[in-house]
């Protein structure tokens, strides 16, 4: 089947996003939010070969996994990634505009959703995509 | 807000959202989100896509496994093969080939049935 993705790739990306956003909030260092937004944007628009988190999984984690690779349609996680780029881009714009409360609020929403997706496989962006396309 | 307060806020956010997810997953008809249907596929399998779409359209949460990836699966002789498992791991139903597409309704019903209602294995009907 065409256009499928290893289920661990989105989970690994989401774990990285959640971890970095949580770190940014604790340290109150908003440029890290912008960095995460750029990495997500590169992965989404330039391809997974440009995705830092994806390449870390493919090169370091996947070769050590035993068993068959479970796959899922690529459309829903790509849409969720697009939402992440939009939200984190908005958060970055809020920081630049001098609205840190708005920026951190948006970043925390993405943090929670990414953490949930990484641990429970409940991807809100994926659900939105599936509901909108059926 | 100092660093400790920010850490506490993150922990609270995660705990609350996890609790909400746990409540949502325990709603009637759910089995805790653990998919009990596995669809085995392979490259070039023309029926695999329609079987997957038909199952997802009926609300079945399924795992899709490519049999040509890494570890071989000797129990799977053809694709598509759909295996429905009970919460204890026992096989409830297994369908392969065109039967997997023709029996989508039965597969979905077996997956969405109450845990413990299954006790027998239903393999491919004799042809």
Image: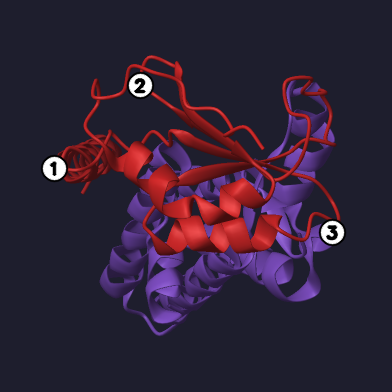
The one of B44 and A66 positioned closer to us in this rendering = B44
The residue drawn where x is 55% and y is 28% is B123
Q: Residue B28 carries which label?
A: 1
**Both labels 3 and 2 in a single chain:** no
In the image, taking residue A37 as reference, residue B3 lies left or right, namely left
Q: Mark 3 points at which residue?
A: A49
Using the rendered view, name the quadrant where residue B111 is placed. top left
For the point 40% across and 85% down, the residue is A97
Of labels 3 and 2, the one closer to you? 2
Q: Which residue is drawn at 77% across and 64% down?
A: A2
Label 2 to label 1, Cα distance in Å? 16 Å
Chain of the residue under label 2 = B
Please name the color used to draw chain B: red
**Are the residues tagged 2 and 1 within 8 Å (C-beta)?**
no
Residue B120 x, y percent position in the rendering: 39, 18
Residue A130: mark in rendering:
none
Instruction: Give whichever of A12, A70 is nearer the camera.
Output: A70
For chain A, give the colour: purple
* Residue bearing the label numbered 2: B87
Q: Can residue A122 be seen in this view?
A: no
Give left or right: position of B67 versus B22. right
């Amino acid at each position: 089947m065409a256009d499928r993705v290893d289920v661990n790739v989105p989970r690994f990306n989401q774990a990285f996003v959640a971890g970095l956003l949580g770190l940014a909030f604790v340290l109150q260092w908003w440029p890290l939010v912008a960095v995460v937004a750029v990495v997500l944007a590169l992965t989404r628009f330039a391809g997974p070969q440009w995705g830092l988190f994806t390449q870390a999984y493919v090169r370091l984690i996947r070769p050590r996994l035993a068993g068959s690779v479970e796959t899922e349609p690529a459309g829903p996680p790509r849409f969720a990634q697009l939402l992440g780029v939009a939200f984190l881009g908005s958060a970055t714009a809020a920081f630049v505009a001098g609205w840190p409360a708005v920026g951190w609020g948006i970043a925390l929403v993405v943090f929670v959703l990414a953490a949930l997706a990484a641990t429970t496989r409940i991807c809100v962006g994926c659900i939105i995509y599936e509901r909108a396309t059926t | 807000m100092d660093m400790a307060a920010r850490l506490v806020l993150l922990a609270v956010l995660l705990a609350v959202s996890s609790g909400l997810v746990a409540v949502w997953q325990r709603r009637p008809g759910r089995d805790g989100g653990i998919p009990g249907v596995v669809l085995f596929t392979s490259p070039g399998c023309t029926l695999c896509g329609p079987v997957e779409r038909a199952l997802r359209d009926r609300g079945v949460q399924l795992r899709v496994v490519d049999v040509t990836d890494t570890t071989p699966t000797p129990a799977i002789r053809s694709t598509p093969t759909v295996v429905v498992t009970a919460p204890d791991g026992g096989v409830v139903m297994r369908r392969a080939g065109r039967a997997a597409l023709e029996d989508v309704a039965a597969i979905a019903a077996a997956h969405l049935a109450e845990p413990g209602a299954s006790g027998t294995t239903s393999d491919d009907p004799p042809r």
